[in-house]
Image: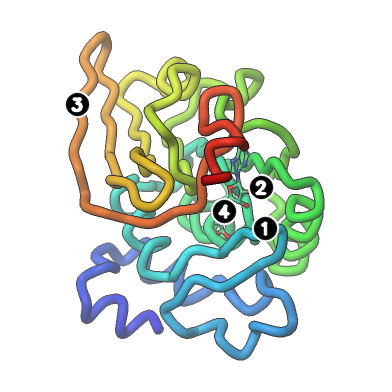
Amino acid sequence: MVASLKARGYIRSPEVERAMSIVPRHLFLPADVRGEAYSDTPLSIGEGQTISAPHMVAMMAEALELRPGHKVLEIGTGSGYNAAVMAEVVGKEGSTITIERHASLAEKARIALREAGYDNVSVMTGDGSIGHEEGAPYDRIAVTCGAPSIPRPLMDQLKDGGLLVIPVGGLSYQSLLRVRKMGQNISTEDLGSVVFVPLLGEKGHRPSDQVR
Ligand code: SAH
């Protein structure tokens, strides 16, 4: 899997290559789809949610320019796999807080993260569209669900010089944006079209938006 992601240009740095070679993706999957763990495909994890395809995890990790020691916030824990990859890159000196709105998924992710040995990840249950003020500021913020726009609280909770990666757009597809905060200046780069499940919540889509 890693060799193919590298050959296709998704993995570019030794840090991300090492992390994705180490994190056991099968531990983050329900038993019925474990056989597919090392295929480059999103998979169903329950509650109508999906674990992102490995190439998307690689793309986000590279876009975030993660380094050892970084303090990371993730919105949308899902299976916990993406959090584990980021935790592996930031190492023991770093830390990762991840927020999931479905308590059942948060609990499964906690178990998988513990089993895989990532005790530097805290899984919270709640609405991540407003971020997590208590742990701010963050060096990096990764949003792994599609937002209608960039939630203001996330920009406020990002460190000066920090990076936020977030899919922004409608319910069927989004643009993956990389946002850099430099004092009062914000620069935004579009990394291409992506498909994520929606960010639901106060600064996200309304649950009723989905019924159409
Ligand atoms: N990073 C995940 C993929 C997650 S799919 C992985 O590695 O498996 C996106 C997740 O975002 C879903 O589990 C969904 O329930 C969650 N989500 C959607 N809106 C949210 C919100 N406002 N706060 C926290 N989690 C949210």
Distance between mark 3 and mark 2 Cα atoms: 29 Å
Residue 117, image x and y in percent? 71, 64
Rendered residue at 46%/56% (across/down)? 89
**Residue 83 shows which numbered tag?**
4
Q: Provide the residue designation for mark 3.
A: 187
Which element is circle 3 on?
A: strand
For label 4, being within 8 Å of ligand 1 is answered yes
| Other residues around mark 1 within 10 Å, as few (<14) / some (14–19) / many (≥20) | many
Instruction: Determine whether label 4 and label 1 are within 8 Å by CB.
Output: yes
Q: Quadrant of residue 185?
A: top left
Q: Are marks 2 and 1 in contact (CB under 8 Å)?
A: yes
- The three-letter code of the residue at mark 4 reads Ala
Give the class, few, some or many, for how many residues have Cα within 10 Å of label 4's Cα (few <14, many ≥20).
Answer: many
Residue that carries the numbered disc 1 in the rendered image: 118
* C-alpha distance separating marks 4 and 2: 7 Å
Which of the two marks, 4 or 2, is nearer to us in this view?
A: 4
